[in-house]
Image (cartoon, rainbow, N blue to C red):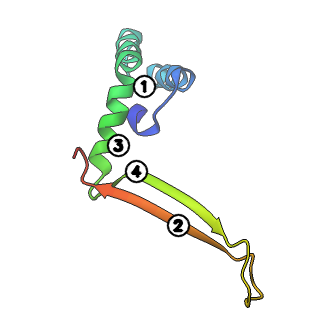
Amino acid sequence: SIASADMDLNQLEAFLTAQTKKQGGITSDQAAVIAKFWKNHRTHIHESLVNQSRWDNVLKNMNWRVDLKSQLRHIDQINTPVAIVEMEVGKNGQ
């Protein structure tokens, strides 16, 4: 629950307090250990869950621009913008 919600420290404290008060829940010592572990490893755990949830290509890079024609002799709609988007995709970890 802590990892899937990516809890911040306030949310973690509230969650663990509720777990210690619940019948059959955890002890305050266990809550302290879980809190310390989460504080030290939150970033790594979150990155691991994100990587495990990907099953296909990922976006590596993206470039874009918008072109606007400034002068044409025989066309009425001069101010029609054209967007050009370049995306680089690749396998996760490659």
Number of marks present in the image shown: 4
- Name the residue furthest bottom: 74
Q: Position of residue 35 (x, y in %)?
A: 41, 16
Camera-side mark, 3 or 1: 3
- Labels 3 and 1: the sequence-earlier one: 1
Residue shown at 55%/23% (left/top)? 14
* Residue that label 2 marks: 84
* Residue that label 3 marks: 50
Q: Amino acid at mark 3?
A: Val
Circle 4 — which element? Answer: strand
Quarter where residue 3 is shown:
top left
- Labels 3 and 4: the sequence-earlier one: 3
In the depicted structure, whether residue 70 falls above or below residue 57: below
Q: Residues within 10 Å of mark 3 (few under 14, many from 20)?
A: few
Q: Is residue 24 visible?
A: no
Residue shown at 45%/19% (left/top)? 20
* Residue that label 1 marks: 23
Q: Position of residue 30 (x, y in %)?
A: 35, 14
Camera-side mark, 2 or 1: 2
* Residue that label 4 marks: 61
Q: Is residue 6 visible?
A: yes
